[in-house]
Image (spheres, rainbow, N blue to C red):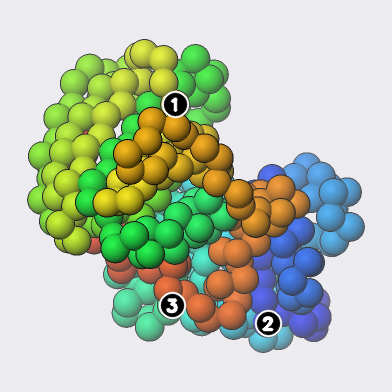
Amino acid sequence: MSYNMNSEFCLVGAGQMAIDYAKVLQSLKQPFVVVGRGATTAKTFESQTGLSVKHGGVKEFLARVQKVPQQAIVAVGVEQLSSVTSVLIESGVRRILVEKPGGLNISEIRNLASLADRRCAEIYVAYNRRFYASVLTAKRLIAEDGGVTSFHFEFTEWPHVIEKLPGEMIKREWFLANSTHVIDMAFFLGGKPKEISSFVSGSLEWHPSGAQYSGAGISVNGALFSYCADWTAPGRWNVEIMTRKRRFIFRPLEKLQVQLNGSVTITDFPLQDQQDHDFKPGLYRQTKAFLSGDVEDLLSIAEHVSNLVIYEKMNGKA
């Protein structure tokens, strides 16, 4: 049996992230086919979205489909991100938005980028925090202020939560799999590092490569930056961006607070963020950008690979 439905656009995955994407795609009135693997997740997906799922996984779907999809969103588990995306590329899908970080480890991501380059595939990695209303508003205000002068960020993780999660391989790569969410956001606003000095110490049973992090550097735009994280102490994600006129505070990241130069008062900045309440924050604008081809704020797989050098140094692996 072959699938003869409209398969121009494919959503791969049937877990919670795929459910979040499906709700956005439905709101944007984008026709799409859903491809899942397991019956349990498919059943949950169908009950929450009202959409049917093509069972059996992406290989079986592509073997039966009459026309290979032109575009796809990959929203499977971290362990399958690289392999599923590779199958899509090898089958002729030329435009893909893959969930962050694009692979289980740096090697998988680099191999995926190499395949995409050989097959001339347009691949973007879905760091949705770039599309928070708080971040895009701050980006505009930073430009009005004349650019960033300095910035600081913290990516402390919560072991009391993480150590209870399944997936030992993912937890060993937690810096890449999770901490880069806030690191990417900080460098997106403040500027990619031109120079960076990094220090790592400690370890956790599930994350032996490090537990305490600190560092500093200068961005390509000339802004000084610093960062810290202590996974054995209390803390939370935090980004602060400084200009000559204002300090922008993201704590939590979905919220924007502002401190004016010459004042100690910190106030909430009003946001037009209804879409971040109606859908998973950042997902609506990110998906719309991918569909429309307005990719200025999306992270290409090639740029992601260049960032891996920075992540390796920050994580004490380079």
- Which residue corresponds to the image point at 72% horizontal and 67% vertical from the top-left? 25
x%, y% of residue 282? 58, 55
* Badge nearest the viewer, 1 or 2: 1
Q: Are marks 3 and 1 in contact (CB under 8 Å)?
A: no
Q: In the image, 95: left or right of 21?
A: left
Q: Amino acid at mark 2?
A: Glu
**Which label belongs to residue 63?**
none
Q: CA distance from mark 1 to mark 2?
A: 41 Å
* Badge nearest the viewer, 3 or 1: 1
Q: Are marks 1 and 2 in contact (CB under 8 Å)?
A: no
Label 2 residue SS = loop
Reading the chain from its start, which is encountered first: label 2 or label 3? 2
- Which residue corresponds to the image point at 35% horizontal and 71% vertical from the top-left? 115
Is the N terminus in the top left, top right, bottom left or bottom right quadrant?
Answer: bottom right
Q: Amino acid at mark 1?
A: Arg
- Which residue corresponds to the image point at 17% horizontal and 46% vertical from the top-left? 224
Is the C terminus in the top left, top right, bottom left or bottom right quadrant?
Answer: top left
Q: Would you name the residue on which mark 1 appears?
A: 236
Q: CA distance from mark 3 to mark 1?
A: 34 Å
User: Mark 3 packing: few (<14 Cα in 10 Å), some, or many (20+)?
Assistant: some
**Which of the 4 quarters of the picture holds residue 311?**
top left
**Which label belongs to residue 122?**
3
x%, y% of residue 231? 35, 20
User: Mark 1 packing: few (<14 Cα in 10 Å), some, or many (20+)?
Assistant: some
Label 1 residue SS = loop
Q: In the image, 206: left or right of 128?
A: left
**Which of the 4 quarters of the picture holds residue 35?**
bottom right
Can residue 285 be seen at all in this image of the molecule? Answer: yes
Q: Would you name the residue on which mark 2 appears?
A: 8
